[in-house]
Amino acid sequence: MYLVDSHCHLDQLDLSAHRGELDLALKAAQTVGVQHFLCVCITLRDFKAMLEIAKKYSFVSATVGLHPNERDIDQEPTIEELIVLASDPKIVAIGETGLDYFRSAGDLDWQRVRFRRHIIAAKQLQKPLIVHTRQAKADTLAILKEEKAETVGGVMHCFTEDWLTAKAALDLGFYISFSGIVTFKNATDCQAVAKKVPLESILIETDSPYLAPNPHRGKRNEPAYVRYVAEYLAELRGISVAELSEATTDNFFKCFKEAKR
Protein backbone atom coordinates (compact mmCIF):
# COMPACT_ATOMS: atom_id res chain seq x y z
CA MET A 1 0.00 0.00 0.00
CA TYR A 2 1.23 3.48 -0.89
CA LEU A 3 -0.21 6.34 1.13
CA VAL A 4 0.68 10.03 1.02
CA ASP A 5 0.32 12.41 3.94
CA SER A 6 -0.53 15.45 1.84
CA HIS A 7 -0.28 17.94 4.70
CA CYS A 8 1.92 17.65 7.78
CA HIS A 9 4.32 19.84 9.73
CA LEU A 10 7.34 17.63 10.24
CA ASP A 11 9.33 20.41 11.88
CA GLN A 12 6.75 20.70 14.65
CA LEU A 13 6.05 17.06 15.54
CA ASP A 14 6.07 15.82 19.10
CA LEU A 15 8.78 13.18 18.78
CA SER A 16 8.66 11.96 22.38
CA ALA A 17 7.36 8.56 21.25
CA HIS A 18 10.29 8.23 18.83
CA ARG A 19 13.21 9.05 21.13
CA GLY A 20 13.19 12.58 19.76
CA GLU A 21 14.18 11.41 16.29
CA LEU A 22 12.31 12.40 13.15
CA ASP A 23 13.90 9.42 11.36
CA LEU A 24 12.00 7.06 13.64
CA ALA A 25 8.70 8.89 13.17
CA LEU A 26 9.08 8.66 9.40
CA LYS A 27 10.02 5.00 9.59
CA ALA A 28 6.95 4.32 11.73
CA ALA A 29 4.84 5.92 9.01
CA GLN A 30 6.55 3.96 6.26
CA THR A 31 5.90 0.74 8.16
CA VAL A 32 2.14 1.28 7.73
CA GLY A 33 2.43 2.32 4.07
CA VAL A 34 3.00 6.08 4.15
CA GLN A 35 5.56 6.64 1.41
CA HIS A 36 5.50 10.39 0.74
CA PHE A 37 5.08 13.42 2.98
CA LEU A 38 4.28 17.04 2.14
CA CYS A 39 5.78 19.27 4.82
CA VAL A 40 3.74 22.46 4.80
CA CYS A 41 5.13 25.85 5.78
CA ILE A 42 3.14 28.04 8.16
CA THR A 43 5.75 30.57 9.32
CA LEU A 44 8.70 32.00 7.45
CA ARG A 45 10.76 32.10 10.65
CA ASP A 46 11.01 28.31 10.43
CA PHE A 47 11.22 28.03 6.66
CA LYS A 48 14.95 27.33 6.43
CA ALA A 49 14.84 24.52 9.01
CA MET A 50 11.74 23.04 7.40
CA LEU A 51 13.36 23.10 3.97
CA GLU A 52 16.41 21.30 5.34
CA ILE A 53 14.15 18.44 6.43
CA ALA A 54 12.75 18.16 2.91
CA LYS A 55 16.24 18.20 1.41
CA LYS A 56 17.36 15.42 3.73
CA TYR A 57 14.69 12.96 2.57
CA SER A 58 13.91 12.11 -1.06
CA PHE A 59 10.33 11.20 -0.08
CA VAL A 60 9.56 14.57 1.56
CA SER A 61 8.37 17.61 -0.40
CA ALA A 62 7.81 21.08 1.01
CA THR A 63 5.91 24.33 0.48
CA VAL A 64 6.37 28.00 1.28
CA GLY A 65 3.73 30.26 2.75
CA LEU A 66 2.48 32.17 5.74
CA HIS A 67 -0.53 30.83 7.65
CA PRO A 68 -3.42 33.33 7.83
CA ASN A 69 -3.23 33.47 11.63
CA GLU A 70 0.48 34.33 11.70
CA ARG A 71 0.62 38.04 12.52
CA ASP A 72 4.29 39.01 12.52
CA ILE A 73 4.75 42.20 10.51
CA ASP A 74 8.48 41.58 10.26
CA GLN A 75 7.85 38.47 8.19
CA GLU A 76 5.05 39.71 5.92
CA PRO A 77 6.21 38.39 2.54
CA THR A 78 6.02 40.25 -0.73
CA ILE A 79 5.11 38.46 -3.94
CA GLU A 80 8.74 38.67 -5.02
CA GLU A 81 9.99 37.18 -1.75
CA LEU A 82 7.59 34.25 -2.03
CA ILE A 83 8.80 33.61 -5.57
CA VAL A 84 12.44 33.61 -4.48
CA LEU A 85 11.78 31.27 -1.56
CA ALA A 86 9.83 28.92 -3.83
CA SER A 87 12.68 28.62 -6.32
CA ASP A 88 14.16 25.60 -4.56
CA PRO A 89 13.22 22.39 -6.43
CA LYS A 90 11.93 20.87 -3.19
CA ILE A 91 9.16 23.49 -3.02
CA VAL A 92 6.14 22.08 -4.83
CA ALA A 93 3.37 24.47 -3.73
CA ILE A 94 2.48 27.84 -2.22
CA GLY A 95 0.85 27.80 1.19
CA GLU A 96 -0.62 27.22 3.44
CA THR A 97 -2.49 30.41 2.85
CA GLY A 98 -6.07 31.57 3.01
CA LEU A 99 -8.44 33.16 5.49
CA ASP A 100 -9.27 32.36 9.10
CA TYR A 101 -11.92 34.47 10.78
CA PHE A 102 -12.16 32.12 13.77
CA ARG A 103 -8.79 32.74 15.42
CA SER A 104 -8.20 36.29 14.22
CA ALA A 105 -10.39 39.28 15.09
CA GLY A 106 -10.83 42.91 14.11
CA ASP A 107 -10.09 44.34 10.70
CA LEU A 108 -8.81 41.34 8.73
CA ASP A 109 -8.05 43.08 5.47
CA TRP A 110 -4.39 42.14 6.02
CA GLN A 111 -5.38 38.48 5.71
CA ARG A 112 -7.12 39.13 2.40
CA VAL A 113 -4.17 41.12 1.04
CA ARG A 114 -1.76 38.36 2.07
CA PHE A 115 -3.97 35.67 0.51
CA ARG A 116 -4.02 37.54 -2.81
CA ARG A 117 -0.23 37.87 -2.76
CA HIS A 118 0.14 34.13 -2.31
CA ILE A 119 -2.22 33.44 -5.21
CA ILE A 120 -0.38 35.87 -7.49
CA ALA A 121 2.94 34.26 -6.59
CA ALA A 122 1.52 30.79 -7.26
CA LYS A 123 0.28 31.90 -10.67
CA GLN A 124 3.64 33.38 -11.62
CA LEU A 125 5.36 30.18 -10.50
CA GLN A 126 2.66 27.88 -11.88
CA LYS A 127 2.62 25.99 -8.59
CA PRO A 128 -0.58 24.84 -6.84
CA LEU A 129 -2.01 26.47 -3.73
CA ILE A 130 -2.71 24.96 -0.31
CA VAL A 131 -5.74 26.81 1.04
CA HIS A 132 -6.81 27.11 4.67
CA THR A 133 -10.29 28.47 5.33
CA ARG A 134 -12.18 28.69 8.60
CA GLN A 135 -15.40 30.64 9.06
CA ALA A 136 -14.46 32.51 5.87
CA LYS A 137 -15.77 30.34 3.06
CA ALA A 138 -17.55 33.10 1.12
CA ASP A 139 -14.54 35.44 1.08
CA THR A 140 -12.14 32.56 0.38
CA LEU A 141 -14.08 31.47 -2.69
CA ALA A 142 -14.58 35.04 -3.85
CA ILE A 143 -10.85 35.81 -3.74
CA LEU A 144 -9.96 32.53 -5.45
CA LYS A 145 -12.33 33.44 -8.27
CA GLU A 146 -11.29 37.10 -8.49
CA GLU A 147 -7.60 36.16 -8.66
CA LYS A 148 -8.28 33.36 -11.17
CA ALA A 149 -6.72 30.73 -8.94
CA GLU A 150 -8.19 28.04 -11.18
CA THR A 151 -5.20 28.59 -13.47
CA VAL A 152 -3.02 26.80 -10.91
CA GLY A 153 -5.51 24.90 -8.76
CA GLY A 154 -4.45 23.24 -5.55
CA VAL A 155 -6.10 21.80 -2.47
CA MET A 156 -8.62 22.90 0.12
CA HIS A 157 -6.85 21.40 3.09
CA CYS A 158 -8.41 19.96 6.25
CA PHE A 159 -11.85 20.43 4.72
CA THR A 160 -14.76 20.92 7.14
CA GLU A 161 -17.15 23.10 5.14
CA ASP A 162 -20.46 22.20 3.45
CA TRP A 163 -21.08 20.55 0.08
CA LEU A 164 -21.80 23.83 -1.71
CA THR A 165 -18.36 25.10 -0.71
CA ALA A 166 -16.74 21.84 -1.78
CA LYS A 167 -18.56 21.96 -5.13
CA ALA A 168 -17.43 25.55 -5.74
CA ALA A 169 -13.83 24.57 -4.99
CA LEU A 170 -14.08 21.51 -7.22
CA ASP A 171 -15.40 23.71 -10.03
CA LEU A 172 -12.22 25.79 -9.68
CA GLY A 173 -10.11 22.65 -10.13
CA PHE A 174 -9.19 22.21 -6.48
CA TYR A 175 -8.81 18.93 -4.64
CA ILE A 176 -10.54 18.38 -1.31
CA SER A 177 -8.36 17.04 1.50
CA PHE A 178 -9.73 15.31 4.59
CA SER A 179 -7.90 15.13 7.90
CA GLY A 180 -8.55 13.20 11.10
CA ILE A 181 -11.57 15.43 11.71
CA VAL A 182 -13.59 13.26 9.33
CA THR A 183 -13.22 10.35 11.78
CA PHE A 184 -14.80 12.27 14.67
CA LYS A 185 -18.26 11.05 15.68
CA ASN A 186 -19.71 14.57 15.61
CA ALA A 187 -18.30 15.42 12.16
CA THR A 188 -21.46 14.36 10.33
CA ASP A 189 -21.46 17.30 7.90
CA CYS A 190 -17.83 16.63 6.96
CA GLN A 191 -18.61 12.94 6.50
CA ALA A 192 -21.55 13.76 4.21
CA VAL A 193 -19.24 15.82 2.00
CA ALA A 194 -16.59 13.07 2.04
CA LYS A 195 -19.14 10.69 0.56
CA LYS A 196 -19.97 13.04 -2.31
CA VAL A 197 -16.59 14.34 -3.45
CA PRO A 198 -15.48 12.43 -6.57
CA LEU A 199 -12.76 9.91 -5.78
CA GLU A 200 -10.49 11.55 -8.35
CA SER A 201 -10.60 14.78 -6.30
CA ILE A 202 -9.82 13.50 -2.78
CA LEU A 203 -6.61 13.84 -0.80
CA ILE A 204 -5.85 12.66 2.74
CA GLU A 205 -3.73 14.29 5.41
CA THR A 206 -2.89 14.36 9.10
CA ASP A 207 -2.15 18.06 9.62
CA SER A 208 0.13 16.63 12.32
CA PRO A 209 0.98 17.49 15.01
CA TYR A 210 -2.63 18.72 15.18
CA LEU A 211 -6.03 16.99 14.91
CA ALA A 212 -5.20 13.35 15.61
CA PRO A 213 -7.85 11.01 14.20
CA ASN A 214 -9.78 8.44 16.15
CA PRO A 215 -8.63 6.34 17.99
CA HIS A 216 -6.01 8.93 19.02
CA ARG A 217 -8.25 12.00 19.19
CA GLY A 218 -6.99 14.57 21.67
CA LYS A 219 -3.46 13.15 21.69
CA ARG A 220 -0.37 13.90 19.65
CA ASN A 221 -0.67 13.35 15.92
CA GLU A 222 1.93 12.04 13.49
CA PRO A 223 2.11 11.09 9.77
CA ALA A 224 1.62 7.36 10.46
CA TYR A 225 -1.94 8.15 11.50
CA VAL A 226 -2.96 9.11 7.96
CA ARG A 227 -3.78 5.43 7.58
CA TYR A 228 -6.71 5.91 9.98
CA VAL A 229 -8.07 8.63 7.70
CA ALA A 230 -7.67 6.33 4.70
CA GLU A 231 -9.35 3.41 6.45
CA TYR A 232 -12.24 5.54 7.65
CA LEU A 233 -12.85 7.15 4.25
CA ALA A 234 -12.69 3.79 2.49
CA GLU A 235 -15.34 2.36 4.82
CA LEU A 236 -17.45 5.51 4.53
CA ARG A 237 -17.43 5.28 0.75
CA GLY A 238 -17.80 1.51 0.58
CA ILE A 239 -14.52 0.83 -1.21
CA SER A 240 -11.34 -0.98 -0.26
CA VAL A 241 -8.47 0.77 1.48
CA ALA A 242 -6.29 -0.25 -1.46
CA GLU A 243 -8.57 1.58 -3.89
CA LEU A 244 -8.72 4.65 -1.68
CA SER A 245 -4.94 4.57 -1.25
CA GLU A 246 -4.26 4.27 -4.98
CA ALA A 247 -6.67 7.07 -5.87
CA THR A 248 -5.45 9.56 -3.27
CA THR A 249 -1.82 8.85 -4.12
CA ASP A 250 -2.45 9.38 -7.84
CA ASN A 251 -4.38 12.56 -7.01
CA PHE A 252 -1.51 13.90 -4.93
CA PHE A 253 1.05 13.54 -7.70
CA LYS A 254 -1.36 15.03 -10.25
CA CYS A 255 -1.91 18.05 -8.01
CA PHE A 256 1.71 18.49 -6.94
CA LYS A 257 3.42 17.78 -10.23
CA GLU A 258 6.90 18.68 -9.00
CA ALA A 259 6.83 16.18 -6.13
CA LYS A 260 9.10 13.18 -6.77
CA ARG A 261 7.35 9.85 -6.49
Image (cartoon, grey):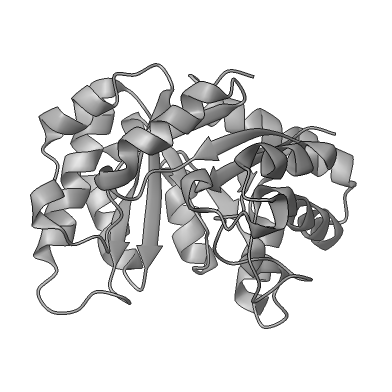
- Could you tell me if residue 128 is visible in this image? no
> Which residue is depicted at the point 74% across and 70% down?
216
> Which residue is depicted at the point 31% across and 69% down?
136
Looking at the picture, how far across and down is residue 22, in whole percent?
Answer: 61, 41
> Which residue is depicted at the point 86% across and 59% down?
235
Of residues 172 and 23, which is closer to you in this image? 23
> Residue 200 vs residue 210: left or right?
right
> Residue 25 vs residue 227: left or right?
left
Q: How many marks?
A: 0
Residue 47: quadrant of the picture: top left
Looking at the picture, how far across and down is residue 81, in whole percent?
Answer: 15, 31
Residue 166 in the image: above or below residue 241: below
Residue 28: quadrant of the picture: top right
Q: Which quadrant is home to the N terminus?
A: top right
Of residues 235 and 164, which is closer to you in this image? 235
Looking at the picture, how far across and down is residue 198, in whole percent?
Answer: 66, 46
> Which residue is depicted at the point 30% across and 42% down?
65
Residue 14 in the image: above or below residue 134: above
> Residue 72 vs residue 44: left or right?
left
